[in-house]
Image (tube, rainbow, N blue to C red):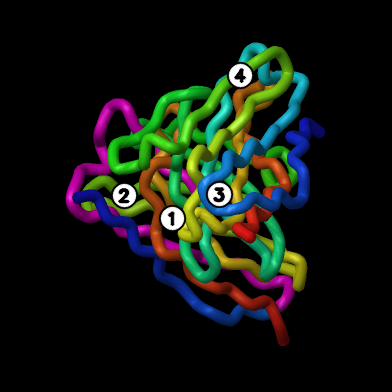
Amino acid sequence: SYELTQPPSVSVSPGQTARITCSGDALPKQYGYWYQQKPGQAPVLVIYKDSERPSGIPERFSGSSSGTTVTLTISDVQAEDEADYYCQSADISGTYVFGSGTKVTVL
Amino acid sequence: HLQLQESGPGLVKPSETLSLTCTVSGGSIRGSDYYWGWIRQPPGKGLEWIGSLYHGGIAYYNPSLKSRVTVSIDTSKNQFSLNLSSLSAADTAVYYCARDYAAALDYWGQGTLVTVSS
């Protein structure tokens, strides 16, 4: 079955930049999406179609794509950005898959 | 402002069928650009997409769950539903409904915990 691979954890100091990668064979042909999930809450879409930001999402969240990898970048990290982040995409048949998630810790 | 709310039993027995409903408010479920999806998250684990459907009846399912899943939509009530059969403890999870806009899950319900136990 199709898989998206994320690092389990990323640690970053306040004000620094966090980068979270997501790798998958279908990513050159399918868009990547990113969700932020805080404890006890539903996920929130923070990036869609590789690099588009929904309204209301701070500009410090950005996305990019290169080959089989999509990347979520959080610039000027704030304490409130501490959360789990999941990437999502589709396989060649159009069914969706999530990455295993990356826990971002703000030191 | 679009809102989604899941409803259904919090406890179901093994081998039984789970039925959940998602009620959509603040917008029509008949929107031509939207699918409506179900996602689940076992305690302490990651997200798993279950399936998405369009108000016209087109549905897509996670292949690993396809044999046990049925999704349906009731446009008159602005609701869509999930049925998951042959439950086991592995189906214990928080179940979310969400609006699926070209694969972007942009609005989510708060989630409902379903425990499978005798």
Q: Where does label 3 land, which residue?
A: B70
Q: Are marks 3 and 1 in contact (CB under 8 Å)?
A: no
Q: Which residue is mark 2?
A: B74
Q: Residue at the location (71% across, 82% down)?
A: B117
Q: Nearer the viewer, residue A100 or B72?
A: A100
Question: In the rendered image of this protein, does residue A44 appear above or below residue B95?
Answer: above
Marks 1 and 2, Cα distance to the nearest angstrom? 8 Å
Q: From the image, tell me which residue sits under label 4.
A: A65
Q: Chain of mark 2?
A: B
Task: State which mark lies toward you, 2 or 4.
Answer: 4
Place of residue B34 in the rendered image (x, y in percent of width and height, measured from the top left): 35, 33
Chain where mark 1 sits: B
Work out whether B80 lies above or below B106.
below
Give SS at disc 2.
strand
Query: Magenta segment range?
Result: B14-38
Circle 1 residue: B81
Q: Given this view, does label 3 or label 4 mark the residue nearer the observer?
A: 4
Q: Secondary structure at mark 3?
A: strand
Within the magenta stretch, is there residue A55? no
Name which residue type carries label 3: Thr
**CA–CA distance in space, label 3 to label 1:** 8 Å
Image depth: mark 1 or mark 4 in front:
4
User: Mark 3 or mark 1, which has the lower sequence index?
Assistant: 3
CA–CA distance in space, label 2 to label 4: 38 Å
Q: Nearer the viewer, residue A61 or B104?
A: A61
Query: Which chain is home to disc 3?
Result: B
